[in-house]
Image (cartoon, rainbow, N blue to C red):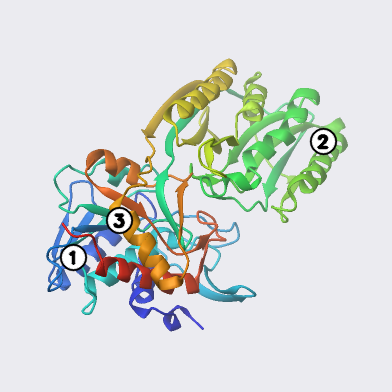
Amino acid sequence: MTIHDLTPKCVWKNFYALTQIPRPSKHEEKAVAFLLKFGKDLGLETLRDEIGNVIIRKPATKGMENRKGIILQAHMDMVPQKNNDKVHDFTKDPIETRVVHKEDGDWLYANGTTLGADDGLGVAAAMAVLESKDLAHGPIEALFTIDEETGMTGANALKPGLLKGDILINLDSETEGELYVGCAGGLDCNAVFTYKDEPLPKGYKVFAVNVKGLRGGHSGMEINEGRGNANKVMARVLLPLLRDMDCKLSSIEGGNLRNAIPREAIAIVAVPADTVDDFKKVVEETDAVVRKEIGLIDPDVKIFCEPAKAKTVMAGRTALKLVKAIYACPNAVDRMSLAVKDLVESSNNLAIVKSEDGKIRIRCLMRSSTDSIKYDLAETFRAVFELAGAKVSFAGGYSGWSPNMQSPILKTMVAKYKELYGVEPAVMAIHAGLECGIMGGIYPNWDMISCGPTLKSPHSPDERCYIPSVEKWWNFLKAVLADAPRK
């Protein structure tokens, strides 16, 4: 079985087309051109706004002109993550898909990379509505945004008055049977250390310390699962080496996306020749301890060292201060919601650590459904890194989306789901960031909701879609459009 055998074909054929178009965040040009051509070929009003978002309008079907306009919204970019041994250029190469049969059903994976079902399936479903000949619906606008994953750039740049609809259905949720009516806001927290290089001391041997095999994942959806963070694990290895054994740090790199839990890290370390055995023992003991602590969630985690080369090391105590700050930096769940059961209220993802050209840059993504708590957590970050001597800055802040339990589209969707499947959907808020929070500030009149098929481990090469959930979600979406609230 391949992707071409899956149903509903109207959705899967569009998703397959998207897998053939490189579209990592910040590189959506080909996806923009594809969607513009798609809309124009259908004879529909199609436009690109100043930032690069694509809007396609489809008139109401006969007899549905008195319904409120619905905006189907999805983001066209995808997170570019791959396994270390996978050769793949996300700016040039298509995504290879594979169907995997498991005890709980069939799943669609990519081959060693992220799948891009986040949010390619949302885009594909909106495309299927636009090209349909037999669906009943009121006025439709499809809004395809750019750069959701690395800054929500498209949503932030959306102009007031451009869209005409009354209801926004965001197609970017990741569990079928759940309706989302609220989400967390976010804030980028950055710290920068400066350092000078000095020649590798005589009598030192150089090793690469590696942290590999962690599952990583979505820093909103999976931050509460206890998954290992490669940067935090690396700090745990390095602290006794730099503090107690006179080891020197030459370079460090871990993680590459602010919204993905870092899966791998590498540090080049210079070790006094007479303490190499003790160095290796620290690495081996830390490996054993970490495996014992997180092996149930990260069974493939591995910490190891191997010979390496370096000509210089970081001078002074900057490296030790860096490692202490990473060690102390808040990470993962900070606070659970007191209002919504089992909802993470605030968290931090210590996402990226990278040394280059005399600077060590640390990037974190903080999330919270309460702005004041988000900024309080940010001040904790500031205190930790400023005490260690780094310069701290904040950027890209956005507010969360507050639930409206009296929403007309929520009532319609709950009723339709129960009518179709005999049970009510779960109505929830989500710790991940959705574009609804931003766009609701630009269009405060919108009635908003979010839904989607079941995805697991987005933002990692383990990303997968539960195939049966797509057909359930599609049939539900069709039923909702056919019974859209009247004006």
Residue drawn at 56 percent across, 62 percent down: 86
Up-down: is 123 above or below 195? below
- First in sequence: mark 2 vs mark 1: 1
Label 3 to label 1: alpha-carbon separation: 13 Å
Of the residues shown, which amino acid type is indicated by label 1? Gly
Left or right: 252 as drawn, with respect to 6:
right
Label 2 to label 3: alpha-carbon separation: 61 Å
Quarter of the figure with the C terminus: bottom left
Residue drawn at 18 percent across, 58 percent down: 68
Mark 3 falls on what kind of element? helix
Up-down: is 5 above or below 161? below
Of the residues shown, which amino acid type is indicated by label 3? Ile
Mark 1 falls on what kind of element? loop
Q: Are marks 3 and 1 in contact (CB under 8 Å)?
A: no
Counting from the top left corner in percent of width and height, residue 200 is at 69, 29
Counting from the top left corner in percent of width and height, residue 329 is at 61, 28
Of the residues shown, which amino acid type is indicated by label 2? Phe
Residue ID for mark 3: 409
Disc 3 vs disc 1: which is toward the camera?
3
Residue ID for mark 1: 138
Number of callouts in the render?
Answer: 3
Up-down: is 126 above or below 323? below
Residue drawn at 61 percent across, 73 percent down: 104
Disc 2 vs disc 3: which is toward the camera?
3
> In the image shown, does 232 or 423 lie closer to the viewer?
423
Q: Quadrant of residue 344?
A: top right
- First in sequence: mark 3 vs mark 1: 1
Residue ID for mark 2: 279
Counting from the top left corner in percent of width and height, residue 217 is at 56, 51
